[in-house]
Image (cartoon, coloured by chain):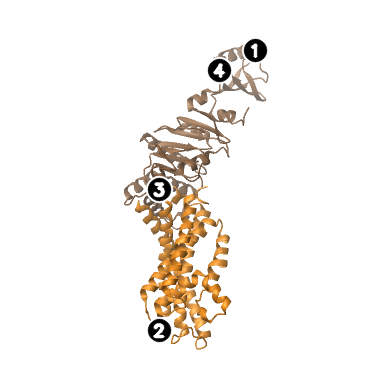
Amino acid sequence: MSLEVDQGEFFGLLGPNGAGKTTLINVIAGLARADAGTARVMGADVLADYRRARRMLGVVPQELVFDPFFSVRETLRLQSGYYGIRGNDGWIDEVMQHLDLTAKADVNMRALSGGMKRRVLVAQALVHKPPVIILDEPTAGVDVELRQGLWQFVRRLNRDGHTIVLTTHYLEEAEQHCNRIAMLKSGRIVALDSTRNLLGRLPGLELRLRLDRGELPEDFPARLVSRDGTRFVLKLDDCRRLEAALARLREAGLEVLEIELQPPDLEDVFMRLTGRGT
Amino acid sequence: MMVGLRTLFEKEVLRFAKVSVQTVAAPVLTAVLYLIVFAYALEGRAQAYPGVAYSAFLVPGLVMMSVLQNAFANSSSSLVQSKITGNIVFVLLPPISYLQFFCAYVLAAVVRGVLVGAGVLVATAWFVELRLAAPLWAVAFALVGAGLLGALGVLAGIISDKIDQLAAFQNFVIVPASFLSGVFYSIHSLPPLWLRLSHANPFFYMIDGFRYGFFGVSDFAPGASFAVVGASFIAVSLATLLLLKSGYKLRH
């Protein structure tokens, strides 16, 4: 695969399990060696110039890992030291404050909940203020409140100029935050485009109707997807067919009791491109 | 560049210091128990060197055995635990070179080994009268011996994926090699075959050389012993560094 993420982007890496997202991240982070090819972080080769590449990079790993010997503050001080930074308490305090960790600063890692441990992982990735941040499934198993707080913080980092690369199973998160998305399947890129363009790839809208009777008129200008009594799920080729569909219902003397119109979402595109949907 | 090494070293020292009852006090107690049991059973019946009481002969051997076993235990168990729990990633992501990685783990292993050895020496000094004929030799053998076992611990930690693999290495290699190295006897009291086998055991040279520092008497010339220990340290270090450089079992 060939892939370039621009500086300052909020980039999404999507794909089913086994697509190669984490392998790709591991190659970039130096945790795995690629069989062939090269990877660079801000121009620094991850093997030949690994020191510079790793200094530029902050990675939030997918697994909820921690060192049970240390408190939150000790963990963050040690992590700073690994990046060659001493006396980093000012920034550590700031990161802890943004991630709502201040009250837990002196608590041992073992005593933290899963959500709190996830926050510490994010904090560890940020101790050296890396210009590029990779978040591998950062909200897996995280409650709604933390998820909101985390996204606010990550978006702020992005606004401040940090490049964000995100993998997530929550497609609505990718849709909401990412400017550009690569969809992976079996180690290959099946789509690489802006989120807007990807969403535009699937023409049509989903029309949900509840009628007063259980029959659609003949030659109805929308394709029937499913039906449950007087409730119909239909597919419209484009927005302009909506008026024709409503007119056809009026002509047939049918009354619309409920109506809902939905544009395609990233999940539809994802399912289509990864061959999981129809 | 050195901050990364220093921090990893400090982390490794903090790791065992936080559980010092288990990592320092317990091995000191074990060594004291060895001294009490063996000295009681064999005092007066065995004499390794003329004019040296058996219990006095035993102490340097027990000190050095504790140094070596604990140096090995520190680096190997830390690495295997980090691999199993996955937190090794915190050390693999930063710009720490494989040489810094090696030095930090080995130096921390030396610190624990020497600390436990000093603890055993202090605790057993109550029971026996010791002299220090050539203290610099004792210090040199303790440091290089701990370094060798610390490096061997890194090697075993890289290769082992599970605690039981490491335990097998410890129980079937480290413990027999240290027990059969002349800690409890002078190898000159052994039959010829066992004497020759003892000469193939690097632990013998470490124990014998360390003991020379106390009594000025040894089974083998201290300079030659030191050459064997130093060469072993270099060989194990090079093998470990090669594995670290290749990323074997660490960077997949």
The quarter of the rendered structure image containing the C terminus of chain A is top right
Residue position marked by numbered label 4 in the rendering: A238
The alpha-carbon separation of the residues under discs 4 and 2 comes to: 97 Å
Residue A210: image quadrant is top right
The chain coloured orange in the image: B
Of the two numbered discs 4 and 2 in the rendering, the one whose residue sits closer to the viewer: 2
- The amino acid type, in three-letter code, at marker 4 is Asp
Write down the residue under mark 2: B129
Separation of marks 4 and 3 at Cα, in angstroms: 53 Å
> Within the image, what quadrant is residue A148 found in?
top left
The answer to whether B79 appears left or right of A103 in the picture is right
Element carrying mark 2 = loop
Label 3 environment density (alpha carbons within 10 Å; few <14, some 14–19, many ≥20): many
Report if residue A138 is visible in the image.
no
- The numbered disc on residue A244 is none
Labels 3, 1: front one:
3
Of marks 2 and 3, which one's residue comes earlier in the chain? 3
Q: Residues within 10 Å of mark 1 (few under 14, many from 20)?
A: few
Chain letter, brown: A
C-alpha distance separating marks 2 and 3 = 50 Å
Q: Position of residue B102 (x, y in %)?
A: 43, 56
The disc numbered 4 marks a residue on which chain? A
- Please, what secondary structure does the residue beneath circle 1 have? loop
Q: Residue at x 36, y 75 (%)?
A: B135
Q: Are marks 1 and 2 in contact (CB under 8 Å)?
A: no
Residue B235 x/y as whole percent: 47, 61
> How far, Cα to Cα, is label 1 from label 4?
22 Å
Alpha carbon distance from label 3 to label 1: 72 Å
The residue at the point 43 percent across, 36 percent down is A164
Which mark, residue B95? Answer: 3
Which structural element holds mark 3? loop
Q: Which residue is mark 1?
A: A252
